[in-house]
Amino acid sequence: MVDNKFPGKDITENDIKEKFPLCAKKNQNHYSKFDVEGIEFGGNIIPVMAGPNMVESKELILDVASNVKKIGAHFLRGGAFKPLSFPYRSEKFNETREQGIEWLRMAKNDFKIPIITEIMEVKYLELISGVADILQIGSRNMQNYPLLTACAQTGKPIMLKRHYGASLRDWLGAAEYILYEGNSKLILCERGVSIPHTHRSTSRFALDLQVVPAAKEITHLPIVVDPSHATFWRPWINSMSLAAVAAGADGIMLEVHPDPDNSAVDPLQPINYKHFSELMYKMDTVAKSIYNRNILQ
Ligand code: PEP
Ligand code: MN
């Protein structure tokens, strides 16, 4: 069915009514607001989720938790179960799995910082939802519908990352599976899309900032931007994070590591504590001046 409201766009009025009515805004000013562990999404704060790519060790995650909390991060991120692109592992490049989940629990208890961590398989749902305040569904699992449904049924807040090849329409279709289960604490996350490698070899993905206003035209769901996975390249983190806030992002996810060059996974993308602290201040300035929203509390 072709309609006139969004002429030439791949999302039609009919999609909004019949394919993802629960994702769709009921009116122009309809934006979801909800609380996760005392932190509001879609409100005056723009929550920041910071931490290492991987929960490498107990020492690392406790150190990062303590530092990012002090600097002003709202959530600690870190994967214990990782969707690594290649099957090879080494002593350093190895998921910490159940042990990593335990270390996240320690970090959460010691530093009173809520946790977001990735869930890849339904069989680990009980274990991971025991510590996660937000269940992260990674880009590679965006359309793993049984996983989406099982996560939604826990009632836990969920962050659904966009697959790097997915249209907004397919992303919202996946989001609808979560809302359909009656779970309304859902956050979208843009983490870069695949493009031809136009800039340099590190341009594996490009941050699709345009999807922020595009999503906000259609859906009431808050949208987080992850410049770390999108750029894969530390020198571009500041510009893309500031641009994401300016574009209207409702949250920012950033990889932070005390010794980025020695990060076990993706060492080109994390920023160190000093860099993170300076960037938090800059993002706060942008958020305040454009939207009267805050990053630092
Ligand atoms: C991550 O956030 O650790 C991650 C693996 O991200 P993505 O699913 O976007 O690649
Ligand atoms: Mn990664």
Image (tube, grey):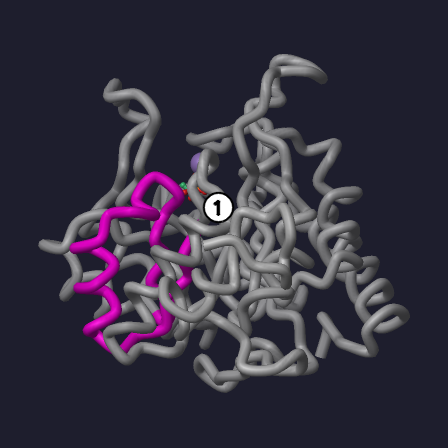
Residue annotated with mark 1 = 52
* Quarter of the displayed picture in which ligand 1 can be seen: top left
Q: Would you place residue 202 above or below residue 265 in this image?
A: above
Q: Would you place residue 96 above or below residue 123 in this image?
A: above
Q: Position of residue 199 (x, y in %)?
A: 71, 17
Question: Number of callouts in the render?
Answer: 1
Query: Residue 140 lies in magenta, yes or no?
Result: yes
Give the camera-side residue of 20 and 220: 20
The answer, for residue 64, to whether it is visible in the render is: no
Q: Quadrant of the N terminus?
A: bottom left
**Residue at 20% in and 63% down:** 149
Quarter assignment of residue 186: bottom left
Q: Which residues are magenta?
A: 133-161
Q: Is residue 72 left or right of residue 150?
A: right
Q: Would you place residue 169 above or below residue 176 in this image?
A: above
Query: Residue 45 lies in magenta, yes or no?
Result: no
The answer, for residue 15, to whether it is visible in the render is: yes
Residue type pointed to by label 1: Pro
Q: Quadrant of the C terminus?
A: bottom right
Q: Is residue 241 left or right of residue 153?
A: right
**Residue at 55% in and 69% down:** 222
Q: Position of residue 125 (x, y in %)?
A: 17, 61
Give the camera-side residue of 158 and 65: 158
Q: Is residue 163 left or right of residue 247?
A: left
Q: Position of residue 124 (x, y in %)?
A: 14, 55
Q: Position of residue 196 (x, y in %)?
A: 59, 17
Residue extending farthest to the right is 289
